[in-house]
Image: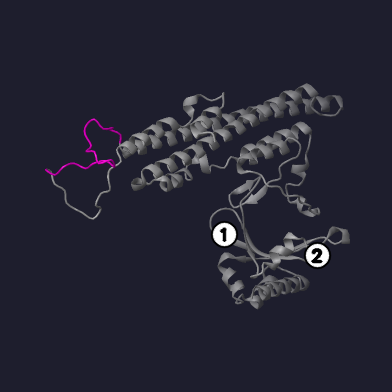
Amino acid sequence: MVKFGLRLSQNRAPEYPPEAYMDYDKLKEIIHELKKKKLARVDSTTREVSLTAPPPTNAAGRQLTADDSPVNEEDFYSTIDKELAKVESFTLQQVTELRKQIDNVENEVKGWVTSTTATAAATSTGHKMNESQIESSRESADTVAKSFLILEKYVNINFMGFHKILKKHDKNSPQHQCKQFYINRMHQQAWVRGDYSDVVVRLSNIYSALRDDHAAEENKDGGQQSFLRSTTKYWVRTEDVSKVKYAILKHLPVFLQKTSTGESDSQLTNSVYFDNDQLELYHGRLDKTPGAIAYRLRWYGAGNPKLVFCERKTHRDTWTGEASVKERFTVDESEVKQVLNDKYPIDEKRKEMQSKKGATADEVDDWETLVREMIQVVQ
């Protein structure tokens, strides 16, 4: 197995200076020095000291002297703080530069489109960009996309490095464990928790313009809900998600989804599935048994949900000519327990649908049937 220090040096991007990466070797050296100072077992219950008693010894029983390493835990903490700040600063600097580059490409593409449209109006011809313009803008977009992927790799290798060095520290200094504290801090820093989906969306718009593809614009107001959906799902490693998105958006537009924070190309999906002790529903769905059912609660986005979907999915084999069905109703987060405990005020909600939401009698009947069936199954 390759040691991480070597792996880190082998995976440095030639586009970035070596000092932009975390100084793994320096942190490792501090841990090595701390290990040499390791004290013998100390009585943690005593609350007194003596100015004339012999000084503490290390684990080998040798008294510590002025010649011993002056390195202490504070040196490790201050060094890792500086390294975290350095990586965060460099990441945000690169993101800012990437967005400027995207601005330039967008302006370039808009300039080509405006110019060709004006020419087309004057000559009564089509207004497509010529091949040389398309190729030039595509190369610029490719450069930005590849730079973004390089940055994401930089973030991942440093993120892994901090995990490993903190684990090494806690293993060698169990009395001063700090990994969990710093992991929590990292997840609050912009270089880890930042959402840069806007880069993906803007690149998608650029590639769509270069293809003269207006599908995303035509379906912006929800038109994409009108077609029959067919999905194929793949497992993708987290570190490869952006790479897969880039491979796709060069050929297909990104459809935006409305989220709690605006529009995005993706959002976090949370699901809680119901089943019995024999996992009948799970195995039915796994084996794709005709009529297999899945019951679940689902909500979107991070943080505490406001709206929760109670869903029932029924599998149908396509060769029968029937389509699989997904039925659902929504409840407020505070009403979930009422649904699970069969205390949901169905009659009250029924009247509310008719008076405030203007639902038809058939729609209300279908809703009530679904709610009662799902509540009954959960019981």
Residue shown at 52% from the left, 31% from the top: 8
Is 354 rendered above or below residue 150? Answer: below
Where is mark 2, residue-wise? 290
Classify residue 168 by image quadrant.
Answer: top left
- Residue most toward the left? 52
Prevailing secondary structure class for the magenta stretch in the rendered image = loop
Q: Where does residue 210 sit, x and y in percent of width and height? A: 75, 31
Which comes sooner in the sequence, label 1 or label 2? 2
Q: Is residue 249 left or right of residue 19?
A: right
Residue shown at 75% from the left, 24% from the top: 135
Q: Residue 234 in magenta?
A: no
Nearest-to-viewer mark from 1 and 2? 2
* Total count of labels: 2
Q: Is residue 328 left or right of residue 120?
A: left
Q: Secondary structure at mark 2?
A: loop
Classify residue 101 by image quadrant.
Answer: top right
Is 359 rendered above or below residue 201? Answer: below
Q: Where does residue 140 sit, x and y in percent of width and height? A: 68, 26
Q: Where does residue 85 sit, x and y in percent of width and height? A: 43, 35
**Residue segment shown in magenta:** 52-71
Where is mark 1, residue-wise? 305
Q: Where does residue 90 sit, x and y in percent of width and height? A: 49, 31
Q: Which quadrant of the rendered structure holds the N terminus?
A: top right
